[in-house]
Image (cartoon, helix red, strand yellow):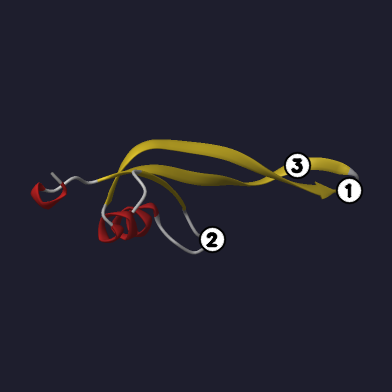
Amino acid sequence: MPKKKKFKVAENESLGECLARMREAGYQPVRRTEQPVFIERDGERVVDHQEIVFEGKRIETEADN
């Protein structure tokens, strides 16, 4: 299992659901990044939505040591 892993918040997923998915996979959030996703509308680039990605660090247990 890698020490760090990125988790992208899915389109129909809440932040809490993404964080729960991270915990189930054995990771805790250490960084949150947001990037705009652009689309072209009427010849102009406009922001469609924000893409949220959490960087997770593996939760160390006594068994890992």
The mark lying in front, picked from 2 and 1, is 2
Residue 10 percent coordinates (x, y): 50, 59
* Numbered disc 1: secondary structure: loop
Residues 46 and 22: in front is 22
Kindly identify which numbered label has been placed on residue 11: 2
Residue at image coords 42%, 44%: 54
Q: Which residue in the rendered view is the most extreme toward the right?
A: 43
- 44 vs 55, left or right, is right
Q: Residue at x 75, y 42 (%)?
A: 46
- SS for tag 3? strand
Amino acid under label 1?
Answer: Asp
User: Real-space Cα distance between discs 2 and 1?
Assistant: 24 Å
Query: Which numbered mark, 2 or 3, is in the foreground of this view?
Result: 2
Q: Which residue is mark 1?
A: 42
Marks 2/3: CA–CA distance: 18 Å
Q: Residue 27 placed where, x, y %? A: 29, 49
Mark 3 nearby-residue class (10 Å; few <14, some 14–19, many ≥20): few
Amino acid type of the residue that numbered disc 2 sits on in the rendered structure: Glu
